[in-house]
């Protein structure tokens, strides 16, 4: 398998007050293979969106390595950053806020395409092509975002991300703001586009059930750390980290034969703060297995079975 995105010991800290530091992403490592979808899930504030944005260079990394196709993308010059933008794009969470209401759909999708080498004469044709790719039609190009439903707006957002013909897309909670009835349509569109265009996705979500549908592998984040990473089947069928088990217990059980009851844990206790946090497992305040070691030593992400990584002292030898 070819690694397209390599992230190692990535940290993204924000100064929140003169003395306080929000450790939004704190020593996170993962690879994304070409053509796969890596899901990244966790509750709001766990750092998943910051992680996606930092990987794309929308936030400068505080520390760590981000490589795209073998190239370090944390220190790109102007020319190289265009190279990266041509390959790596983002679909935003809120299709209402992310489209400029004063621009036509055609202008939104086609904005800046000349910078990526498209001849102005070919622009209309490219816009029509993109609209048809996402299930809209060329007549929509002259309309404004407010004339569309939430699902259609997200299709416009997807067309905009596809405009430069990228290989890799960070999908930042692309369905969270949509009605449940149309969430599946947008996910199915993303799956179809992935097959047709050979795309690679980092799919960020808090909805575990939708992530299972689209992801080959899933990483679970908790307060800036990845606490579990495995194939979708493995993660949903045999979760190991107490937090993953708790998250999964919140999803209605579609198949009682899975005997999930064995794996299910309620999510209780106080959520800690990611500000100025020191060593120790950040889930300790909510974990019924927490020991003294958990409070003083940060568990490292370790491979406990082939391709199944867990950060929890319960798995220390
Ligand atoms: Fe619970 Fe300790 Fe594992 Fe953290 S390291 S999840 S506190 S058992």
Image (tube, helix red, strand yellow):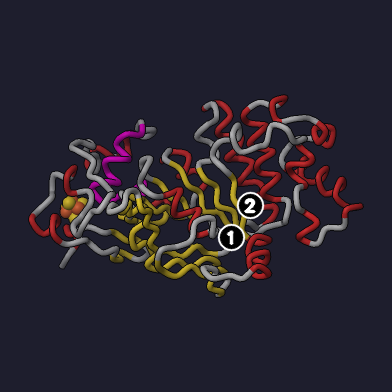
**In terms of secondary structure, where does tag 2 sit?**
helix
Pick out the residue farthest to the right. Answer: 121
Mark 1 neighbour class, 10 Å CA radius: few under 14, some 14 to 19, many 20 or more: many
Q: Quadrant of the C terminus?
A: bottom left
For the residue pair 59 and 129, the one nearer the viewer reads as 59
Cα–Cα span, label 1 and label 2 = 8 Å
| Tally of numbered tags | 2
Q: Residues within 10 Å of mark 2 (few under 14, many from 20)?
A: some
- In the displayed orientation, state which residue is furthest to the left: 292
Label whose residue precedes the other's in the sequence (1 or 2): 1
Answer yes or no: do the residues labelled 1 and 2 have beta carbons within 8 Å? Answer: yes
Report whether 282 appears left or right of 217: left
- The foreground one among 8 and 50 is 50
The quarter of the picture where residue 43 lies is top left
Q: Is the CB of the residue bearing disc 1 within 8 angstroms of ligand 1?
A: no
Question: Residue 194: which numbered mark, if any?
Answer: 2
Residue 282, given in percent of the width and then of the height, sits at 23, 51
**x%, y% of residue 55?**
50, 60
Q: Position of residue 15 (x, y in %)?
A: 36, 53
What residue is shown at x 19% (from left), y 60% (from top)? 279
The image position of residue 295, as x and y in percent, is: 13, 55
Q: Which residue is mark 1?
A: 35
Q: Is residue 36 visible?
A: yes
Q: Is residue 53 magenta?
A: no
Say whether residue 84 is left or right of residue 117. left
The magenta region covers: 235-251
Magenta stretch prevailing secondary structure: helix
Which residue is drawn at the image coordinates 16% and 62% (left, top)? 297
The reply, left or right, for residue 261 in relation to residue 36 is left
Residue at 33% x, 54% y: name it.
23
Q: Is residue 77 left or right of residue 50?
A: right
């Amino acid at each position: 398998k070819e690694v397209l995105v390599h992230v190692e010991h990535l940290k993204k800290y924000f100064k929140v007050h003169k003395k306080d530091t929000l450790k939004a992403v704190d020593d996170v490592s993962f690879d994304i293979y070409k053509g796969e979808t890596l899901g990244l899930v966790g509750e709001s504030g766990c750092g998943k969106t910051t992680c996606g944005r930092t990987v794309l260079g929308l936030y400068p990394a505080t520390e760590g390595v981000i490589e795209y196709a073998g190239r370090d993308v944390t220190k790109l010059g102007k020319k190289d950053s265009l190279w990266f933008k041509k390959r790596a794009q983002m679909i935003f969470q809120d299709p209402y806020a992310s489209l400029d209401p004063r621009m036509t759909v055609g202008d939104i999708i086609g904005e800046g395409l000349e910078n990526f080498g498209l001849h102005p004469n070919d622009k209309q044709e490219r816009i029509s092509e993109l609209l048809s790719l996402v299930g809209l039609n060329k007549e929509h190009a002259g309309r404004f975002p407010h004339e569309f439903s939430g699902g259609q707006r997200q299709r416009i957002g997807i067309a905009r991300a596809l405009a430069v013909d990228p290989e890799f897309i960070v999908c930042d909670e692309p369905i969270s703001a949509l009605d449940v009835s149309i969430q599946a349509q947008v996910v199915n569109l993303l799956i179809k586009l992935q097959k047709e265009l050979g795309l690679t996705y980092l799919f960020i979500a808090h909805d575990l059930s939708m992530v299972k549908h689209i992801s080959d592998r899933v990483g679970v984040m908790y307060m800036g750390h990845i606490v579990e990473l495995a194939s979708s089947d493995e993660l949903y069928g045999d979760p190991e980290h107490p937090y993953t088990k708790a998250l999964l217990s919140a999803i209605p059980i579609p198949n009682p034969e899975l005997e999930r009851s064995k794996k299910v844990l309620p999510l209780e206790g106080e959520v800690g703060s990611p500000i100025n946090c020191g060593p120790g497992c950040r889930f300790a305040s909510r974990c019924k297995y927490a020991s003294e070691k958990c409070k003083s030593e940060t568990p490292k992400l370790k491979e406990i079975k082939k391709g199944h990584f867990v950060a929890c002292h319960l798995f220390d030898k």
